[in-house]
Amino acid sequence: MIDYTARLTALMEDIVGRVPALGFIDMREVLVFARHGRRGAGGALATCHTLDPSGAGPDRFAWVDRRTGRVVRQSEWFVVRAPDVRMAGRRVRHLISFALPRFCEQTLGDAGKRDHYPEGAPWLAKLDTVVHELYHIDPGAGGIRRAARADGTASRRTHGAAFYRDVAGMVRAYLATRPDPALLDFLACDYRELVRRHGAVTGRTFRNFPSFPQSYLEPVDGPEPAPDVELVRLRTHRQPPRYAEDDLRLRRFMARGRPVLIDDYLNTRRTDTTRGPQ
């Protein structure tokens, strides 16, 4: 079986060691995991998640009547918190998730990246996505990098034309260092080819799959809303406050159906073998 998340982690470690613009990233503070993404379905192929809250003070949500401009509903006051994730005793600051098996099917045409790699092989789309997610990590204050406006100030957006050009430039810079082909060969395979070569595609997940550690809103005391403004209570946060190695599980990702724990999958295979040919 191929552990796709382990292969992606090894590739990322090599990338940050070869691309100066990403050299500030300490991969001991980044955890790569897998989410379920059906082949042919829409949605993100990969996502960078921060476990570094912004540090901003208490805030609230407000709903305004478009006609009158008056606030009609207001949430409780809150601060942004994040669970404490530690691997080998070291705090994890970012999570990068990949949708399996959908990520395995990505090509330049499907991803709209052919303009950046006009003569490139289809698997460059996957390498571009890997670099893309690493580039989301902010080198300064932590969190997620914001796109820059024309005047150089930070935008509220996380993407822009310059972002995509920068990523393509880093991909070319990485390949120019002539990395070990053994680190890249798995990207050239789609899902069916990976199964043919390795028997199964697996990925690291969390014990409470499909959930994973995420920032959440914690209610705090604050000014009460006006008497004519409806107060909206925040949803109760039910995720674990801490995660460690014991919370990780390896799952097999299949073309159809939900991912299954490797132990459950292997036990099923053993049972089928003892029954003889079906």
Image (spheres, rainbow, N blue to C red):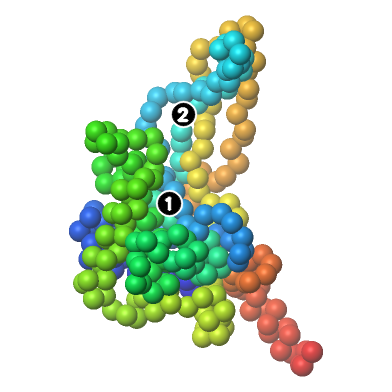
User: Residue 238 placed where, x, y %?
Assistant: 60, 41
Question: Left or right: 169 with respect to 207?
Answer: left
- Secondary structure under the numbered disc 2 in the rendered image: strand
Q: Nearer the viewer, mark 2 or mark 1?
A: 1
User: Residue 264 placed where, x, y %?
Assistant: 66, 72
Q: Quadrant of residue 38?
A: bottom right
Label 2 neighbour load within 10 Å: few <14, some 14-19, many 20+: some
Label 1 neighbour load within 10 Å: few <14, some 14-19, many 20+: many
Question: Left or right: 15 with respect to 218?
Answer: left
Q: Residue at x 47, y 65 (%)?
A: 109
User: Which residue bears the numbered disc 1?
Assistant: 48
- Determine contact: label 2, label 1, CB under 8 Å: no
Q: Residue at x 55, y 20 (%)?
A: 62
User: Residue 65 placed where, x, y %?
Assistant: 61, 16
Residue at the far bottom: name it.
277
User: Which residue bears the numbered disc 2?
Assistant: 79
179 vs 238: above or below: below
Q: Nearer the viewer, residue 97 or 171?
A: 171
Q: Residue at x 23, y 62 (%)?
A: 19
Amino acid type shown at disc 2:
Val
Residue 89 visible, this orientation: no
- Secondary structure under the numbered disc 1 in the rendered image: strand
Q: Residue at x 40, y 39 (%)?
A: 157
User: Residue 220 placed where, x, y %?
Assistant: 50, 23
Question: Left or right: 215 with respect to 146?
Answer: right
Amino acid type shown at disc 1:
Cys
